[in-house]
Image: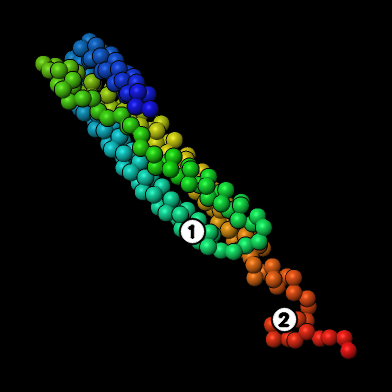
Amino acid sequence: MRQRLARHLSALSSRLQSTIDEARDEAEEGCAAVDIDSLRLTHKEIRERVARLDTNTSRLDVKATSLLGFISAISLFLATQKTNGWWKAPAFAALLGAAFYGFQALRIRQFLDSPDPRSLVETTAGRQEAAVLVLLTAAQILVYEENKQKHKTKTKNWHISLGLLVAAIVATIAALTLGGVNGKINQQQPPGQGKGQPATTNG
């Protein structure tokens, strides 16, 4: 697992460095004709989008944690209830699926960050501001695209977990209503022999 993660990070770093190199070549060719104010605005907007994406991901982690708390509470409640037959099985199956996708949504992933400070300084040393802005903008675009895809995966898992939790709640209500011990006893009791009514005997 560690080797796989290391290879993945190495591939992302190589891709990021390649993007920086390409942007550097383009910046060196046309930085004199580029509007510096437009570059500043573009870089600022992309950087703010990356920050908003990070904030949304953090909020999604909080939602996934809360969802897992609800799943745990409902599981404990259902485990303490007495039902007849297999009525608990669908509810527990839905809760198990909800917990699985909830943990998938909360699972730690290696999100891509801005270029390494040391390599960034070495790459941008002695260059004009326009060239540096082009490099930084290209790096931020790559960061945003990579992290957005991971955020979509987390969001998808969270929605699946939420849907399974709703199904588990419905199944729990059905188990307690239709398969409850008290309900079963009342259904088996003959008419006219409710609580407080003595049974009649044939004389």
Q: Quadrant of residue 25?
A: top left
Q: How far apart are marks 2 and 1 (CA)?
A: 33 Å
Query: Where in the figure is residue 68, as x and y percent of width and height?
Result: 43, 50
Most distant residue in the front direction:
203
Q: How crowded is mark 2: few (under 14 residues within 10 Å), some or many (20 or more)?
A: few
Q: Quadrant of the N terminus?
A: top left
Is residue 115 something that shows in the picture? yes
Left or right relative to 29: residue 56: right
Badge 1 amino acid: Leu
Query: Which residue corresponds to the image point at 59% horizontal and 64% vertical from the top-left?
Result: 82
Q: Mark 1 points at which residue?
A: 76
Residue at 31 percent of width and 29 percent of height? 112
Residue toward you, 133 or 173: 173
x%, y% of residue 118? 16, 22
x, y percent for residue 20: 26, 18
Q: In this image, 42 relative to 160: left or right?
A: left
Mark 2: amino acid = Gly
